[in-house]
Image: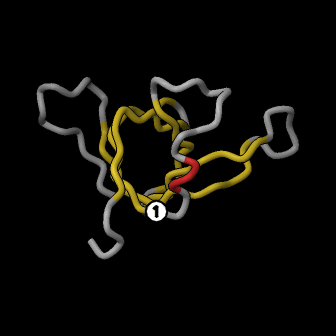
Amino acid sequence: MNMSADNNKDKQPGTVTMRGRLALRIFGMHSKSEHLAVYLATDDGDYLIRPAAGNPFMENPLMPMAGKMITATGTIVDYVFLVTSWKEVNDAV
């Protein structure tokens, strides 16, 4: 995983960029909150991932990209990576 605090002055403090593969997994197993969720699997760990401006109760727009490698920028709040931008990257890179 490439996690870096970018030196770009346009970025908010605490903003990180990470690279990993999107994966679908069950979140909150055996609870009232159990549902299929999107995770970013990185070399340094896995994060529940969703758009920062998105509604957490609606379908995650990253879901159709499951299995793809992405680079994403955003902030980490607890175990959730709230992304402001993302793009698909080549597996070979």
Query: Amino acid type of disc 1?
Result: Lys
The image shows residue 2 at horizontal and vertical percentages of 29, 55
User: Which one is in front, 27 or 45?
Assistant: 27
Q: Residue at x 68, y 54 (%)?
A: 25
Q: Quadrant of residue 33?
A: top right
For disc 1, the marked residue is: 68
Residue 10, position as x, y percentages in the image: 16, 25
Assign a secondary structure to mark 1. Answer: loop
Identify the residue at image location x=25%, y=45%.
4
**Where in the figure is residue 46, as x and y percent of width and height?**
53, 53
Asked where in the image residue 74 lies, by quadrant, the reply is top left
Q: Residue at x 35, y 44 (%)?
A: 86
Q: How many marks?
A: 1
Q: Is residue 86 above or below residue 57?
A: below
**Is residue 11 or residue 58 the one in the foreground?**
58
**In the visual, does 56 lie left or right of 17?**
right
Identify the image quadrant of the N terminus.
Answer: bottom left
Residue 15 position, x and y percent, is: 30, 32
> Going 59% across and 48% down the picture, which residue do you hit?
38
Q: Give neighbour class at mark 1: few <14, some 14-19, many 20+ (Cα, 10 Å).
A: some
Please identify the quadrant where the C terminus is shown: bottom left
The figure's colour scheme reads secondary structure
Q: Return the residue nearer the eye: 9 or 59.
A: 59
